[in-house]
Amino acid sequence: MRALRSTAVVAGILAALTLSGCSGAGNNTSEHATINFMAADPQKTYQPVIDGFEKANPNITVKFTYVPFDQYNNVVSQRIGGKDAGVDVYVADTGTVGELATKGYLKDLSSLKPQAEKSSLSAAVKANEYDGKLWALPMWTSQQYLFYNKDLLTKAGIPFPSSDPDKRMTYEDLLADAKKAKAAGATWGMILDQIDRYYQLQPLAESAGGGSGATGKDLLTADVTNAGWTKAMDWYSELFSSGVAPRGDGAQQMVDVFAGGKAAFMISGPWQITTNAQARPPVNFGIAPNPLFEGGKATMATGSWNIGINPASQHQDAATSFIKYVSMNQQGNTKSTQVSGITPTNLKSFNAWIAKEDAIDAPSTSGVGALTLEELKTAAVNRPNSPGFEQLQDVLDRAFSDIRNGQEVDTTLKNAQSELQSDWDQLK
C-alpha cells in the first residue's frame, strides 16, 4: 500500500473516525457493546457479514469506517499506533502482519490458533504468524488468472492460451501476442489489475528468479537489483513503452477496461469474473493459468485481507466474537465475500466457493475451479512477512510507477534499493 502524502486528507479521516468512537459496556458481551470496524473496502462489501453478525449477536453493534486503500497504512499507524481505542477491529493485508505485530499494533491471538487451524486454509493461517505467534485471523485469500478476450484474439489471428497449467504461456509470448492484438485494433493489448502495486508485480520478479526483494534472516536486506528483478521490470517497462498498456489509468479502473472489451489480455483475480458477468454488453472471455518467464517458474499473487484486534480496544470480548464470526464461522466468512466475489479462507466456505466458481459465468468460467486449486497448490507466492513490509511496498510501488511512466529500469531499481535499505537500516 502506498503511504499517504496528504495531511489534510488524513486529518479528515481521523476526524471521522473520532466521531464514530465506540460506546458500550467493556468486555462483557452479555451487556451491550458497540465496536468499531475499520477496513479498506467500502461498507457495501462488509454489510452482509455485519448484518449476519448483529443478527446472531443482538447485544453487539458494529459500526463501520471505510478508509481508501492508498490511505489505509497511514491511518492505521496514526490510530492504532496512537493507542486509540476508537478502533476495535481492523483488517491487515497479507505481508503486513509481521510489521504490525512488531510495532504492537495487533493483539496476540495465539489462543485461537487451534481453532483457526481446524477452520481455515492452513497457508492463510501461517501467513498471520510471526515470531511463533498468531496475530490475526484469515478472512480472504486471492489468486490470479490470465483473462483473454476471445473476440479480440480471433480478430488478430492469435490462438487462445491453453488452460493446462503444464502448457502455460510465457511472458515473452504474451507480450508478443499483446502487440499483435493492439495492432489489430484492440484498445489495449495487455493490462494488469493492480497495475503498479507490489501485490501484482512481485510474481513477475519471482518467476524470473529475482525473489521477493526482501532477503536475510530478518527479511530486512533489500535485493531488487538482481538479474531476475531487472528482467521482470524490463518486461514491465516494455508494456508501456510499446503502447500495449495504458500509462494514465489507475488500478481501480482496470477491471472495467477488460470487462468493457477494450483489452485483449489481463492478469486479474476472481473479482474480474464477477465484473465480467455483470458487463453489458457481455464480454466473450476465457481464463488460462498465470504466465511464467522462459526458464523461470510458475508464480501467482495470493493472499488478501486478514482481521485482527487493536490491543487498545476496550471491548476485547465483543471484538473477538466478531473476528471469529468473520473468519471461523462458515456463514460469516461466506457473507464477507458475498459482494466482492473474492475467495474465502474458511474451509467449508472455500470448498463451496470452488464448487460454484465454474458456473459463475459459464461457459467462460468452465474449469476455473480446478484451475484455482492447482494454481494455489503449485504457483502461489506470499508476500514476505517482513517487519519492514510497509517500506518495501511504499518504495517499490513508487518505483513501479516511475518505470511505468518511462524512467530507466536499472537506475530506478538502484535508487529503490538504496532508499529501501536506508529505511530498513533504521529498523535494525
Image (cartoon, grey):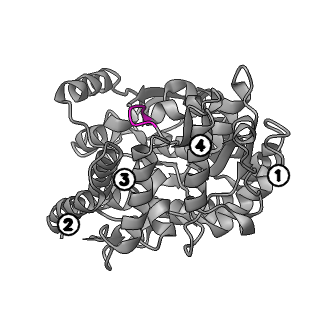
| Cβ–Cβ under 8 Å for marks 4 and 1 | no
Question: Who comes first in sequence, dot 3 or dot 2?
Answer: 3
Instruction: Give coordinates of residue 249: x percent, y percent.
Output: 43, 31
**Given the image, on which type of amino acid does mark 3 rest?**
Leu
**Given the image, on which type of amino acid does mark 4 rest?**
Val
Residue 367 disc label: 1
Residue 21, above or below 286: above
Question: Who comes first in sequence, dot 3 or dot 4?
Answer: 3
Residue 329, above or below 99: above
Instruction: Give coordinates of residue 297: x percent, y percent.
Output: 57, 72
Q: Is residue 247 magenta?
A: yes
Residue 326 disc label: 4
Q: Nearer the viewer, mark 3 or mark 2?
A: 2
Q: Nearer the viewer, mark 4 or mark 1?
A: 1
Q: Which residues are magenta?
A: 246-250
Q: Residue at x 61, y 32 (%)?
A: 185
Question: Who comes first in sequence, dot 4 or dot 1?
Answer: 4
Question: Quarter of the image holding residue 46?
Answer: top right
Question: Who comes first in sequence, dot 1 or dot 3?
Answer: 3
Question: Quarter of the image holding residue 149?
Answer: top right
